[in-house]
Image: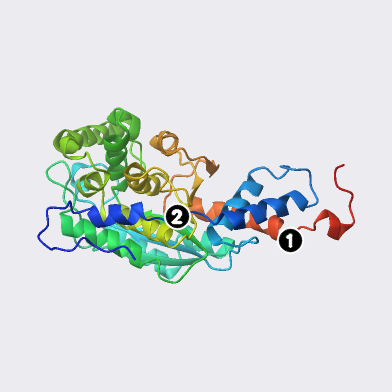
Amino acid sequence: MVHKQPGDGSKAPWWNGFEQALAAVTEPDQSAKKAAMDRQASLTKPPGALGKLEDIAIWLAGWQSRERPSLDKARMVVFAGNHGVTAKGVSPYPSSVTAQMVANFRSGGAAICQLCQTYGATLEVVDLDLDRPTADFTEQPAMDIEECQHALARGAEAVDKDPDFLLLGEMGIGNTSAAAALALALLGGEPEVWAGPGTGLDKQGVARKAGVIADALALHQRHCDHPFEALRRLGGRELAAIAGAVLEARTRRIPVLLDGYVCCAAALVLERARPGALDHCLVGHVSSEPGHAKLLAGLGKAPLLDLGMRLGEGTGAAVALGVVRGAVATHNGMATFAEAGVDNRG
């Protein structure tokens, strides 16, 4: 479990406990990976003929510490938060939509509900103080230290049912602005590179959004030397919760499937704090949100899918779960050359 930094009066930075957790993260089981590689070499196909499906199965075997990985307990967690920066007109939708969509998730009416049912994942929605949006980050930090610690801890606490595969999604009107500001602070570039239409801004709206992000960086950039401080100042509760969940999953060696732009921006915090922190993560898809491909390049991650999606909610990850299931089914269920009585290569 990731714990908040204790208020012991020390001069250690508030993120010290999270850095310590990152420093102690586990690695995949190399013997399980080797066993999975050996199995792949024995299956009735030319070596490498299933391409990335083979890589996924071997990767999953290493993190699950078993030659034949399982997806019996795939679990989607969607974190929801509200953002004070919506007052600056960065979204065509009001922040009230966040809570309304959370209710829609829980009643089974949203896209993510249908996709989880189709691809075999349980769904949990965690709403984070929706009646109390973060502060407008063009005027002050989005969260105070206690709020950010609490959101990180809420994310860690959500990893509590021992899934064998954890999928992460988000909901929050205005959160692509937070993602763009965080990516800009941690990867550099220009606001126009990271700002996109989100839930449907027109060209003028995107330009306004880029201006808002520029204002935020002008206020906070000099304080963003550490990724966790950038998260506190420019992120949101759902982004912090995603970061906390990803870190907790790594400490417990649970493999993770990330969704789109917002999820990956949250995970970027961990990767910048400790390179390799996301080795236990796959990225489900590349969003049509224009900054996502650049963000993935910064993470060194290749998406499983490119379907032109930009809904969020975890929907890209849910569809990509079908690919991962295909990888596991072929790895576990195919016959070996010996079992099938098929001649192998000489």
Furthest-bottom residue in this view: 161
Element type at marker 2?
A: loop
Q: Is residue 257 visible?
A: yes
Name the quadrant containing residue 189: top left
The vertical placement of 236 against 166, above or below, is above
Residue depicted at 79% across the width and 47% down the height? 45
Q: Position of residue 55 (x, y in %)?
A: 62, 47
Name the quadrant containing residue 21: bottom left
Locate the N terminus and report the quarter of the image it occupies. bottom left
38 or 334: nearer the viewer: 38
Residue depicted at 56% across the width and 61% down the height? 65
Determine crowd level at label 2: few under 14, some 14-19, many 20+ residues with C-alpha closer than 10 A.
many
121 or 335: nearer the viewer: 335
Q: Position of residue 26 (x, y in %)?
A: 44, 56
Q: Where is residue 4 in the image (x, y as percent from the top left)?
A: 23, 62
Q: Where is residue 332 in the image (x, y as percent from the top left)?
A: 70, 60
- Residue type, label 1: Gly
**Left-right relation of 32 to 187:** right
In primary-sequence order, the first of circles 2 and 1 is 2
Q: Mark 1 points at which residue?
A: 333
